[in-house]
Amino acid sequence: MSTAATVRAAIVVTGDEVLHGRVAESNGAFLARWLEAHGVIPERITVVPDDAAVIRDLVLSHVEDGVDLVITSGGLGGTHDDVTMAAVGEAAGRALYLDAGALATIEARVRSFPLGQRVAPEIRAAANEKQAHVPEGSNVLPPVGTAPGCVVPIGRGSLVVVLPGPPFELQPMWQAATEHDPLLRTMLGRVPDRGRQVLRIAGTIETQMIEALRDLGPSATDGVRMGICAKAGELEVTLADDGRIGAAAELASRLQDAFGTRLYSVDGSRLETVVGRLLVEAGQHLALAESCTGGRIGERLTSVAGASGWFLGGVVSYANSAKRDLLGVDAAILANPGAVSEPAARAMAAGARLAFGADWGLSVTGIAGPSGGTADKPVGTVYLGCVGPGVDAVAHHQLRGDRARIREGAAALALHLLRRALAGEIRGDSVSPE
Amino acid sequence: MSTAATVRAAIVVTGDEVLHGRVAESNGAFLARWLEAHGVIPERITVVPDDAAVIRDLVLSHVEDGVDLVITSGGLGGTHDDVTMAAVGEAAGRALYLDAGALATIEARVRSFPLGQRVAPEIRAAANEKQAHVPEGSNVLPPVGTAPGCVVPIGRGSLVVVLPGPPFELQPMWQAATEHDPLLRTMLGRVPDRGRQVLRIAGTIETQMIEALRDLGPSATDGVRMGICAKAGELEVTLADDGRIGAAAELASRLQDAFGTRLYSVDGSRLETVVGRLLVEAGQHLALAESCTGGRIGERLTSVAGASGWFLGGVVSYANSAKRDLLGVDAAILANPGAVSEPAARAMAAGARLAFGADWGLSVTGIAGPSGGTADKPVGTVYLGCVGPGVDAVAHHQLRGDRARIREGAAALALHLLRRALAGEIRGDSVSPE
């Protein structure tokens, strides 16, 4: 019944490229998400320069503060400004040595890069040897790219896991380490299993959740760790048992009663996954007609592996001529009331459905800005169309924010419209707000 | 001739949603990018929980270490777990007071939210009053959403700038503060102007840059602060004068000689912007045919404001029937050699060009995985087609990584193919690697 996590963790992100704003840092969020899902909340994520003394001191201060698990990302490249391995070795009091196995793997990997073949051999060799150096007494983590990582014992039973900076290297290496590295497995095995659920609630703002919790009474959140996060078009709510087994599931069920069909995901599945699942269940296919979103809805849907089972394709009808020629939108509609209008959205959805021979057509047309707005149709005006079996609906939204935010919001709202139609919440052409 | 920055900065990101991995942190990168472009490199970005004591102690330790400018993001919401304003007030020894002007702005803002009207009045009022509290003696920054920020004097001439967490609120508020807040303007005015350039080099890896720098001789980087960052399909190189005026421009010019046309951007412009500029210069229009990228290329191109001047649209031809019916790809090609092949890529590009009446057609077809690969065409097989005035070219790539990385890489390589064709580097159907 303890509420204390049994592993204390911290994340250290190294890299001038992050502090200089050249790279949006995503490794911290990835590791935090993984840890949270496994019952460990990192206490701190710190981004520091590629400076060996700074990295060493920060790792040492975490270990001295009683942190069990320090995960570093970055600074494992083949150049002199990649210093993380040396810094961690110094913190742990372990000299670096050239690991022959790691070197052989790196050399084989570099030989398979076409561009690498164009680089002078002595520059390649120096980079390879630099990357094959790891602290004595550490477990080497095999490279995904050319940089091995390692798990380094430090202090009284603490560990430092050293991972590379590129996310496509870090993520599989971390996953493999949690599965295969004996030191890391033992440490993570100390964390008790807890109930945990991620809910997604459409068309809801944070104060509405506060109100719902008040209505459930003061004990509703007892024994639950709850996180609420407002995202484009929805709230993401994370619930985890924190003191009482089953408390998260109980609260999830009460929130389902409170929010009804707006609560559309109880297992954390993303909107595009839920839509795909509904289409598979119905044995139906979808086609898109996107204007101001420019392909973003298609990109979200096709990020789901296996999307070809229910997604036929779409037309990005950016020019009016494309709306007319590829989607069959009547030139009279495009002239008046215009391409950003209820009839245009309806015709685009119907046109996509017809052009692809799909069961469902979904459309977006709007003004993302910064220019193009008028008094009648200001920037942020968006019309969504959804046409399918028994459904011929259009929704109008007035969105706020800059071009990127309006496009992202329009894509999310279109997918929500389709989700509601697939779930049977929308019939005919009546769309009431969620 | 001093190499020392005259303003030392640190960023403190608060928010359980980040540590719990619910939100990918982007405010640190945004602020770091802005600061770097204005001659200030933040020394540290730290993500900490919504815990007033932790935030207070971190702010104090930065100020005691001699940091001039601490920027916080997040924790300004209307609920009890939003504690940043109180924590910063405590660090600065300044009590919070209810700012009447801020409250009036918040109330007006909340009245304009449709969803806000559904929340009980007493819950709304409590949230509004909470958000209108700021430290005494601070400059209030007007809210973009419902949370005001502030600029708080602390220690001996240091400042804390308190900003909200949502990026679409933080970014305009920060921009406005740098333009209008007298305390912040005075501090940033201490930073000397320096030459600075961001270069983008296609088809190049980091060791090739190391080799190029070696060939330029040991003094090539004297007086320049240089950052190299490998991104999908390119290197991003940041150069800034660091001790000698004009040093960055000089190195940029030497790198242009070394890399030739591969160095395609000397002012930091992104690939989609460069492509759009080339199309505008040529007075030509583009259409797309995307398969495995699902709309990502269209989304990138239409992220550029004014894209409607040179982008007509595209077909996301995910199903083979769409490749046949909307793009006119011969059924015989789709049967053999198949939809992922050189002839299919060529026919898709030509089909898009024809369907939209465009000058240029650009296509992508490939296998993003995780399933769908064969011995002949493993996951990561990608064919790109580019058809336009005097150009009818196809490129083949074998990409590595997971579904997301293959899709991102294919989109970037397609845009690079088009860029080279528009720049006259590709004629007929011959495509040699960059």
Image (spheres, coloured by chain):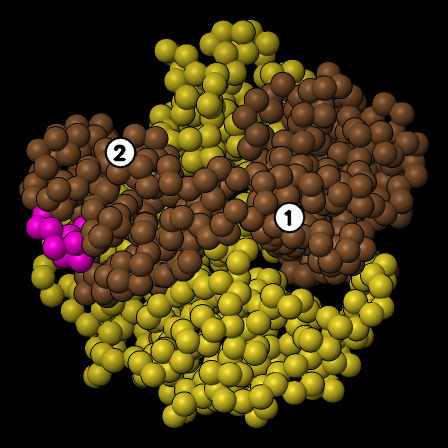
Chain colours: A brown, B yellow
Q: Chain of mark 1?
A: A
> Which corner quadrant of the image does residue A294 belong to?
top right
Q: Which residue is mark 1?
A: A237
Q: Is residue A88 magenta?
A: yes
- Quarter containing the N terminus of chain B: bottom left
> Residue A333, located in which quarter of the rendered image?
top right
Residue A20 magenta: no
Could you tell me residue A371's position as x and y percent?
Answer: 69, 61
Residue B357: % across, % down = 65, 33
Q: What's the magenta bit mostly, secondary-structure-wise?
A: helix
Residue at 31% across, 81% down: B65
Count of residue discs: 2
Q: Is residue A78 above or below residue B83?
A: above
Q: Which residue is mark 2?
A: A182
Q: Which percent across, then down, holds residue B324?
A: 63, 16
Quote the CA–CA distance across marks 1 and 2.
33 Å
Q: Which residues are magenta?
A: A84-96
Q: Left or right: A332 with respect to A234? A: right
Residue B323: x, y in percent?
61, 20
